[in-house]
Image (spheres, grey):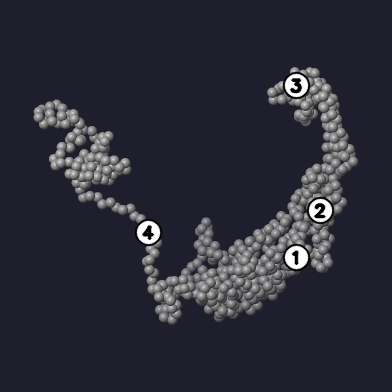
């Protein structure tokens, strides 16, 4: 059996399982496969019909979860003590069984066979009533036994006596008390005694306050009743255990009946979930045959909106073994073959189908190849995955198979792909199975026209709105309408001519009827789209040493401070600038001319006045007049 996820049946299962209550029914739904027994399939279809009828007539069935009951029953059989919570769940399950019996009996008036499953249910009224009488709100009720009622009454009386004794002690020794109320400390009733009066009040110290100034003492008169209370609580616990063991034994004795109840409830949950799905999807019961013929009337895709889905009419089988569906892209070919496959699979799983009327033959397997199946991790291309799946299908297919293939022969060279598509169809025809395939190859259409037992079908297309109508016409081959669609969407006439000539030759260009309003021969460049912004290349001056002169006023970036050029640009592009705080060496690209030197100073101006210190100028003057040992050092 090969029902792939591409057929989307898993989505139907997920929708279906959400309508079930018990986990067993959900698991059965997820693992559901087409039924191969005709008798079983007809029974399942009848159950679905009757389940839907009862839901429509009598409302939602009272199915309750019984998932925990098998585990509880196994504990009871092993002799382990059941808790009050577990016993209440058993009682709840029996209540659900009782309600289901009443619900099913209402269907007997309509002579519904499903309603007679009430005979397989046993509400075990004695056990249910006994549990409900003895267990309430998660506790063993005081009226569960006369002994328990007596013990709990004595406990209440003893607790009251303890409080009275504590109050008497506090009244007698009120001067010794740190407060006016008694309290429980470490499970004992105590009175608050001042530390300094510890030995005046008879009793035992149980606890003390955080400061140590108050002692919590159990008076001797109270201690006597506390011992009596402890004995009563032991008696209460023993009595509760005896009641729980008795109820556990009663549950264990009903194991066989409870197991049958669980089985029937889970089975009914499965049946009613099919009825609910039939109502939700507006389905009908299909006719089942083994005559190798499928006829669907106004079939809908189960996962599509009923208001938008276009119904499909299709007949296949007998002399018509295969249908080759052609038509434009987005024309509904894939949806159509999924529509047929899903409804057939649903019918053979015991579900109703989304049709007005349907007659569906049983198939031994449903084999599907839809989607490209590309797998990068396994290094499979689209074509390789496609061929792998096809070869697996051809190996498994037989005369009772139903094969679904989408875009037959796609993913490779068109000429070779066409040949492979024809060879696949021929192999399917020889095997005698029913098949639906979609394709764009004209040669495949021609093969279907001249081959017995294979017919063409096309998906209709609205040429005015460029939208598919999703209607199938069997007996006619479709066309892709690629050139027409491209022209309507604005492809220039020149490009269309090139495309038509490449596909069908020069003669086809002359015969093609272009639209009257298609006068555009080529694309215009009105909208050039986003542009790349390049970095502007800066052209360097031919002689950098001539770009700035000594004495030029310049702006230094990024601080935008004014300085005076004191050394021109060297071969590395660096120059010296006299700034207010001293001389700096900087790249010429960070400098901009502010005022030229010839506009600031007279001709032959002595710039040493600006750039040299007084000491340097005096030393230079001495060196010009006489021989001297003075050395002038300039900072780098």
Q: In this view, does 350 lie to the left or right of 90?
A: left
As measured in the structure, the alpha-carbon distance from the residue carrying label 2 to the one carrying label 4 is 76 Å
Image: 117 above or below 314: above
Q: In this view, does 503 lie to the left or right of 436?
A: left
Q: Is residue 340 left or right of residue 444?
A: right
Say which element carries label 2.
Answer: helix
Q: Earlier in the sequence, mark 2 or mark 4?
A: 2
Q: Are marks 2 and 1 in contact (CB under 8 Å)?
A: no
Frontmost residue, 277 versus 199: 199
Residue receiving disc 4: 531
- The x, y position of residue 297, in whole percent, is 66, 74
Q: Do the residues labelled 4 and 1 touch (CB within 8 Å)?
A: no
The mark lying in front, picked from 2 and 1, is 1
Q: Which residue is drawn at 53% across and 72% down?
A: 467
As measured in the structure, the alpha-carbon distance from the residue carrying label 2 to the one carrying label 1 is 25 Å
- Mark 1 Cα within 10 Å, few/some/many (few <14, many 20+)? few
The mark lying in front, picked from 2 and 3, is 3
Q: Residue at x 63, y 72 (%)?
A: 311
Q: Earlier in the sequence, mark 4 or mark 1?
A: 1
- Mark 2 Cα within 10 Å, few/some/many (few <14, many 20+)? many
- The x, y position of residue 509, in whole percent, is 42, 78
As measured in the structure, the alpha-carbon distance from the residue carrying label 1 to the one carrying label 3 is 77 Å
Image: 312 above or below 125: below
Residue receiving disc 1: 56
Residue receiving disc 2: 94
Q: Earlier in the sequence, mark 3 or mark 4?
A: 3
């Amino acid at each position: 059996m090969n029902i792939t996820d591409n057929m989307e049946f898993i989505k139907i299962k997920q929708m279906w399982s959400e309508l079930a209550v018990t986990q067993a029914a959900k698991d059965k739904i997820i693992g559901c496969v087409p039924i191969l027994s005709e008798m079983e399939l007809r029974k399942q279809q009848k159950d679905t019909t009757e389940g839907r009828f009862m839901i429509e007539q009598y409302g939602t069935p009272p199915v309750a979860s019984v998932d925990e009951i098998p585990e509880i029953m196994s504990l009871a059989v092993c002799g382990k003590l059941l808790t009050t919570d577990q016993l209440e769940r058993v009682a709840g399950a029996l209540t659900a069984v009782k309600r289901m019996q009443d619900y099913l009996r209402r269907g007997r008036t309509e002579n519904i066979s499903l309603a007679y499953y009430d005979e397989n249910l046993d509400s075990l009224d004695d056990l249910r009533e006994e549990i409900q009488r003895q267990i309430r709100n998660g506790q063993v009720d005081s009226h569960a036994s006369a002994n328990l009622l007596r013990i709990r009454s004595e406990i209440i009386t003893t607790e009251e006596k303890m409080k009275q004794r504590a109050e008497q002690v506090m009244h007698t020794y009120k001067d010794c008390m740190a407060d006016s109320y008694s309290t429980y400390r470490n499970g004992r009733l105590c009175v608050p005694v001042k530390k300094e009066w510890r030995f005046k009040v008879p009793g035992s110290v149980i606890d003390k306050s955080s400061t140590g100034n108050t002692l919590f003492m159990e008076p001797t008169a109270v201690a006597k009743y506390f011992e009596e209370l402890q004995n009563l609580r032991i008696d209460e616990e023993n009595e509760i255990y005896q009641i729980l063991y008795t109820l556990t034994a009663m549950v264990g004795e009903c194991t066989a009946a409870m197991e049958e109840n669980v089985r029937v409830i889970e089975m009914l949950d499965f049946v009613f979930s099919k009825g609910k799905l039939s109502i939700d999807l507006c389905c009908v019961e299909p006719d089942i045959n083994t005559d190798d013929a499928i006829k669907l009337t106004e079939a809908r895709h189960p996962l599509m909106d009923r208001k938008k889905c276009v119904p499909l009419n299709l007949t296949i089988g007998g002399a018509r073994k295969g249908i080759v569906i052609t038509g434009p892209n987005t024309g509904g070919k894939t949806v159509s073959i999924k529509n047929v496959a899903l409804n057939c699979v649903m019918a053979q799983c015991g579900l109703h189908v989304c049709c007005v009327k349907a007659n569906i033959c049983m198939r031994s397997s449903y084999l599907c190849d839809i989607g490209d199946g590309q797998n990068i991790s396994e290094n499979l291309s689209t074509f390789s995955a496609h061929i792998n799946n096809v070869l697996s299908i051809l190996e498994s297919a037989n005369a009772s198979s139903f094969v679904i293939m989408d875009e037959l022969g796609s993913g490779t060279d068109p000429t070779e792909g066409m040949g492979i598509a024809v060879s696949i169809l021929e192999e399917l025809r020889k095997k005698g199975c029913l098949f639906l395939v979609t394709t764009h190859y004209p040669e495949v259409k021609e093969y279907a026209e001249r081959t017995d037992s294979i017919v063409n079908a096309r998906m209709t297309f609205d040429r005015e709105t460029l939208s598919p109508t999703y209607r199938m016409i069997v007996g006619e081959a479709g066309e892709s309408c690629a050139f027409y669609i491209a022209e309507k969407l604005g492809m220039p006439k020149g490009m269309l001519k090139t495309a038509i000539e490449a596909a069908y030759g020069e003669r086809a260009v002359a015969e093609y009827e272009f639209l009257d309003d298609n006068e555009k021969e080529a694309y215009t460049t009105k909208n050039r789209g986003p542009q790349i912004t390049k970095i502007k290349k800066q052209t360097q001056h031919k002689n950098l040493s001539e770009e700035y002169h000594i004495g030029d006023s310049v702006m230094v970036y990024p601080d935008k401070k004014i300085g005076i050029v004191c050394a021109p640009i060297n071969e590395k592009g660096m120059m010296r600038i006299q700034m207010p705080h001293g001389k700096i060496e900087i790249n010429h690209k960070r400098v901009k001319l502010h005022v030229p030197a010839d506009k600031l100073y007279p001709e032959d101006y002595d710039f040493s006045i600006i750039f040299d210190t007084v000491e340097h100028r005096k030393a230079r003057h001495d060196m010009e007049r006489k021989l001297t040992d003075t050395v002038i050092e300039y900072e780098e």
